[in-house]
Image (cartoon, grey):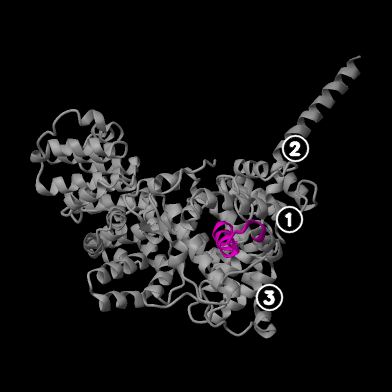
């Protein structure tokens, strides 16, 4: 019996020890298991686990997974994902060693980006200033802020550059806030600058930045929170004396105008005498912007009262859009000329300024502006070309890509790495590698790489790559027509313009067959599940199940039928129907009902309140115009396609769609 107990105790001890060893060696065991295929089916699976660990800053897991990937075909990313999780604690020697080892690669530049953010945060300016000029992609706004901060620390005057850079508070982070703070402390930013930043933060509902600006201005958190979140409460009383009270009152007016611009306008009119001329203009600008976003005709009068105001980027543009909707061409000209140079040079405002000049009889000046953009392949370039008396056609195609040209691209290590990532559905990494290689190439090589994308059935890459060229052009790459037989049959049966459908698909999914949006839209035509079910029921597709939405043929049938429904519902206007496809039919009906007069389709598109939908409609109809030129083999008119948008009262009552 005693022996039996000893044996039991011994077995228990062995078991306990074994469990301890299993726990201690679990990471190594997991890595080993991954290597022999017991935990992960392939090395790619283990690489995905490594990537996921890096995305979650799990250094221990990243090290474990990387240990089993010693022979992986993309070692630079294995090393990167390990180091990324330790970037805050890694030594400069270790980071430099990685950059040197993979010198000239996309991932080395990405790590330099990560490191620069740490250096800027720590104010290690000597190393930052050494590394920042070597950052090739240079697309990080935080680093732009840190770069200006470094210059300011070295006693350079950077306020003017900072004012140009700091216009989007929602994109601020530690770097941009640190820049504002330092410039305020050193006297490069004035109180006016800080109030301007606070107004922008309020306008875009960027509360964290608003609170930080308030702190720099010595405004209490309670007061700024009330002005932004509970404006009606602050506005119950007349404005108190002093700059702070006036600024908060005007901010509250702008916030109230988001829900009730008429009440905000009545309030400002009531206490107008208590404000200076500049303050009154600022108040009207706040109210005008919110009224403009609601497409209220009263916004035009508010903008006229806001002439002396300091405007945000959005306000500059919405002043023009309001003037366009109401046909006030003098204000269109005045408002565009008042824009900052970088905004004024945007093709949209070049085109509309040309229209304003022609409207007042200055034809030569207007045509000179059209000529600046008429050779550009986009919405405004097409409109400008038509204003010059020409139609939109297909340019002469460059010579076909030869096998000799294609061979080096097939063997290009960076492009092959990109293709590998795309095959793993790692589109972010794939696009990084793809675009990195394109930076080294001329236009002819871009067309060759676009052809490589076509051969790998990556039509989105083909389109995006070919779109980069300005001299050598191949519209068969830019405007592909996959599934042409199915598309022709469906559009013919419905009597829908096939060029328009292709134009919409090019914008929706870029021909990615399994595309899925962040809101759940699927397939080539990006159908929402509820819409797919509605259309399937409407057209008698009784056997439809949700999974079929990703079937190419089903997606085309459902999407094209839905497009035809909204087109019919909205009086045959492709501008309205395109907006409805993106934002739902109810919204374009509301935008149309706010019109006080018929407007050109281009003006309607320009004044769509939703940023995404505004760009969407322009791109879809621009695409459709090029597709029509390809299909019909003759020049086209974008202006005719846009047509006129007529106020609701002049049309029959609309049917309702979901």
| Residue 582 percent across, percent down from the top left | 51, 50
The magenta segment is: 492-510
Q: CA distance from mark 1 to mark 3?
A: 24 Å
Q: Could you tell me if the residues under marks 1 and 3 are in contact, i.e. CB atoms within 8 Å?
A: no
Query: On the picture, is 560 further left or further right than 92?
Result: right
Pointer 1 local density, CA inside 10 Å: few below 14, some 14–19, many at least 20: some
Q: CA distance from mark 3 to mark 2?
A: 47 Å
Q: Earlier in the sequence, mark 1 or mark 3?
A: 1
| Residue 443 percent across, percent down from the top left | 53, 80
| Picture residue at 71% right of the left edge, 65% below the top | 485
Quarter placement of the N terminus: top right
| Residue 616 percent across, percent down from the top left | 48, 57
Q: Which label belongs to residue 405?
A: none
Q: Earlier in the sequence, mark 1 or mark 2?
A: 2
Residue 363 found in image quarter: bottom left
Q: Earlier in the sequence, mark 3 or mark 2?
A: 2
Report which residue position mark 3 lands on.
410
| Residue 473 percent across, percent down from the top left | 54, 79
Report which residue position mark 2 lands on.
22
Query: On the picture, is 439 further left or further right than 66?
Result: left
Quarter placement of the C terminus: top right
User: Is any part of residue 101 visible from this angle?
Assistant: no
Helix, strand or loop under label 3? helix
Report which residue position mark 1 lands on.
43
Q: Nearer the viewer, residue 481 or 212?
A: 481
Residue 425 found in image quarter: bottom right
Q: Main secondary structure of the magenta part?
A: helix
Q: Could you tell me if the residues under marks 3 and 2 are in contact, i.e. CB atoms within 8 Å?
A: no
């Amino acid at each position: 019996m005693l022996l039996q107990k000893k044996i039991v105790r011994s077995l228990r001890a062995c078991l306990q020890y074994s469990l301890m060893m299993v726990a201690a060696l679990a990471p190594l065991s997991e890595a080993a298991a991954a290597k022999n295929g017991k935990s992960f089916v392939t090395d790619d699976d283990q690489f995905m686990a490594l990537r996921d660990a890096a995305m979650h800053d799990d250094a221990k897991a990243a090290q474990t997974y990387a240990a089993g990937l010693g022979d992986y075909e993309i070692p630079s990313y294995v090393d990167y994902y390990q180091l990324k999780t330790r970037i805050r604690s890694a030594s400069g020697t270790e980071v430099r060693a990685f950059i040197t080892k993979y010198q000239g690669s996309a991932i080395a530049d990405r790590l330099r980006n990560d490191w620069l953010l740490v250096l800027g945060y720590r104010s290690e300016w000597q190393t930052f200033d050494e590394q920042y000029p070597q950052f090739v992609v240079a697309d990080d706004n935080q680093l732009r802020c840190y770069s200006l901060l470094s210059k300011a620390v070295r006693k350079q005057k950077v306020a003017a550059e900072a004012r140009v850079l700091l216009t989007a508070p929602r994109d601020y982070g530690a770097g941009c806030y640190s820049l504002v703070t330092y410039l305020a402390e050193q006297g490069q930013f004035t109180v006016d600058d800080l109030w301007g930043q606070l107004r922008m933060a309020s306008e875009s509902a960027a509360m964290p930045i608003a609170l930080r600006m308030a702190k720099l201005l010595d405004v209490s958190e309670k007061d700024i929170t009330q002005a932004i979140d509970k404006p009606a409460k602050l506005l119950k009383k007349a404005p108190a004396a002093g700059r702070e009270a006036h600024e908060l009152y005007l901010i509250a007016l702008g916030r109230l105008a988001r829900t009730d611009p008429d009440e905000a306008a009545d309030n400002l009119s009531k206490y107008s005498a208590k404000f200076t001329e500049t303050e009154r203009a600022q108040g009207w600008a706040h109210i005008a912007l919110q009224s403009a976003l609601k497409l209220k005709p009263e916004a035009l009068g508010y903008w006229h009262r806001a002439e002396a105001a300091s405007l945000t980027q959005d306000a500059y543009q919405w002043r023009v859009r309001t003037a366009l909707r109401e046909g006030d061409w003098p204000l269109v000209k005045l408002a565009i000329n008042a824009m900052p140079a970088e905004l004024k040079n945007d093709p949209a405002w070049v085109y509309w300024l040309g229209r304003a000049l022609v409207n007042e009889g200055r034809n030569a000046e207007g045509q000179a502006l059209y000529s600046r953009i008429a050779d550009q392949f986009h919405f405004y370039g097409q409109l400008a070309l038509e204003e010059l008396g020409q139609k939109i056609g297909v340019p002469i195609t460059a010579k076909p890509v030869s096998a000799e040209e294609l061979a080096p691209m097939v063997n290009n290590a960076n492009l092959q790495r990109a293709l590998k990532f795309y095959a793993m559905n790692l589109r972010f990494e794939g696009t990084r590698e793809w675009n990195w290689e394109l930076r080294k190439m001329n236009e002819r090589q871009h067309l060759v790489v676009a052809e490589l994308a076509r051969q790998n059935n990556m039509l989105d890459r083909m389109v995006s790559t070919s779109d980069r060229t300005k001299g050598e052009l191949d519209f068969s790459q830019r405007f592909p027509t996959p599934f042409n037989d199915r598309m022709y049959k469906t559009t013919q049966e419905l009597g829908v313009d096939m060029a328009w459908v292709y134009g919409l698909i090019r914008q929706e999914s870029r021909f990615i067959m399994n595309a899925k949006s962040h809101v759940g839209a699927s397939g080539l035509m990006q159908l929402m599940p509820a819409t797919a079910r509605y259309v399937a029921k409407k057209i008698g597709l009784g056997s439809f199940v949700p999974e079929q939405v990703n079937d190419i043929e089903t997606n085309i049938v459902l999407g094209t039928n839905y497009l035809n429904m909204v087109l019919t519902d909205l009086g045959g206007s492709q501008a309205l129907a395109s907006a409805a496809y993106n934002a739902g039919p109810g919204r374009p009906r509301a935008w149309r009902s706010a019109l006080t007069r018929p407007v050109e389709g281009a003006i309607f598109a320009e004044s769509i309140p939703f940023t995404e939908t505004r760009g969407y409609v322009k791109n879809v109809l621009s695409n459709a115009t090029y597709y029509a030129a390809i299909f019909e083999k003759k020049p086209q008119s974008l202006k005719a396609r846009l047509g006129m948008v007529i106020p609701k009262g002049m049309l029959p009552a609309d049917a309702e769609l979901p």
